[in-house]
Image: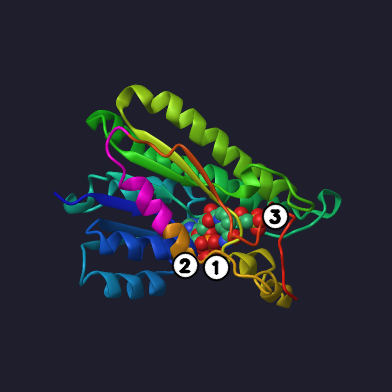
Amino acid sequence: MRKTALITGATSGIGRATAHEFAKHDINLILCGRRQERLDTIKKALERTTDVHTLNFDVRDKAATFEAIARLPEDFKKIDILINNAGNAHGLDPIQNGDTDDWDAMMDINVKGLLYVSKAIIPQMTERQSGHIINIGSSAGKEVYPKGNVYCASKHAVLAITEGMRIDLNSFGIKVSAINPGLVETEFSKVRFKGDAVADSVYKGYKALQPEDVAEIIYFAVSRPAHVNIADLLVFPTAQASSTIVKKSI
Ligand code: NDP
Ligand code: 8X3
């Protein structure tokens, strides 16, 4: 019997690549995001291979999040795999210049949104005593870099929540994993720099991770035997040694 995965942030980058990777492996998909046109396009491309349902909600909106998940059609109600991926950095400023709207966005989306989606799905997993939750953290959850302050805090929180989930859900046989990438070439920097041209330079002069690289790792994690849980995985592009050390050719 096919498994069903719910992926947040499936309209772009790592989430979209994970949807494609899972479809290749016969996993049914619930794809979430705010951009309906993109959800429709991805659904159209993948429904030749697997069953796809889309959900349009903002993870910051607690009521909309719970309602969307509660209203899933019968065939998609049983969720075996949750990929908590929706998130972004907003701004890159020293703390004294930080924009409080950016801080709200990062804490509300990356931390509270992840909690709301998890809260909407965990009860069915505890009831069935099975399931796998993968939280997309970041190398920024393991080290803090200059001007990264609140984004790094949000990703440190994702790691703490992941550990807390793993402890609390251990007795239910639920796997909980954190996958923590370094630099991945997605729309992440366009969002962080709000369309500023500086975003174009972030992935220049070296080969950054591609979203498909991370998607393959996520599939590796979900496809381990029942007794194996990838608890916490850090992946960098080869050119990257830490958040601040990247070997660039230009
Ligand atoms: P993208 O900007 O390409 O994708 C972000 C996704 O999150 C989009 O699908 C977007 O969908 C969704 N999203 C953003 N805000 C909301 C919201 N309020 N409600 C619902 N969905 C939302 O970035 P990435 O693929 O790079 O990012 C995915 C995850 O990976 C994030 O958690 C990020 O922190 C993490 N990460 C990224 C790295 C990188 O270098 N790129 C490295 C390490 C971790 P929509 O706009 O349609 O709602
Ligand atoms: C994304 C990677 O280094 O831009 O989490 O914070 S970084």
User: How much space separates mark 2 and mark 3, taking CA atoms?
Assistant: 23 Å
Would the CB of label 2 be found within 8 Å of ligand 1?
Answer: yes
Would the CB of label 1 be found within 8 Å of ligand 1?
Answer: yes
The answer to which of 227 and 51 lies nearer the viewer is 227
Q: Is residue 115 visible?
A: yes
Task: Please state the horizontal and vertical placement of residue 198, each as a whole percent of the image.
Answer: 73, 73
Q: Which residue is drawn at 55% across and 41% down?
A: 158
Per the image, label 3 sits on a secondary structure element best described as: helix
Q: Which residue is drawn at 57% across and 68% down?
A: 185
Task: Answer whether residue 87 is magenta in the image.
Answer: no
Q: Are marks 3 and 1 in contact (CB under 8 Å)?
A: no
Q: How crowded is mark 1: few (under 14 residues within 10 Å), some or many (20 or more)?
A: some
User: How much space separates mark 2 and mark 1, taking CA atoms?
Assistant: 7 Å
Q: Which colouring convention does the figure follow?
A: rainbow
Q: Can residue 9 be seen in this view?
A: no
Q: Which of pointers 2 and 3 lies earlier in the amino acid sequence? A: 2
Mark whose residue sits in front, 2 or 3: 2
Q: Which of pointers 2 and 1 lies earlier in the amino acid sequence? A: 2
Mark whose residue sits in front, 3 or 1: 1
In the image, residue 173 above or below residue 15: above
Residue 12 marker: 2
Q: Which residue is drawn at 56% across and 33% down?
A: 160
Q: Picture quarter containing residue 7?
A: bottom left
Q: Are marks 2 and 1 in contact (CB under 8 Å)?
A: yes
Q: How crowded is mark 3: few (under 14 residues within 10 Å), some or many (20 or more)?
A: few
Per the image, label 2 sits on a secondary structure element best described as: loop
Span shown in magenta: 216-227
Q: Picture quarter containing residue 173?
A: top left
Which residue is label 3 attached to? 101
* Quadrant where the C terminus is found in the figure: bottom right
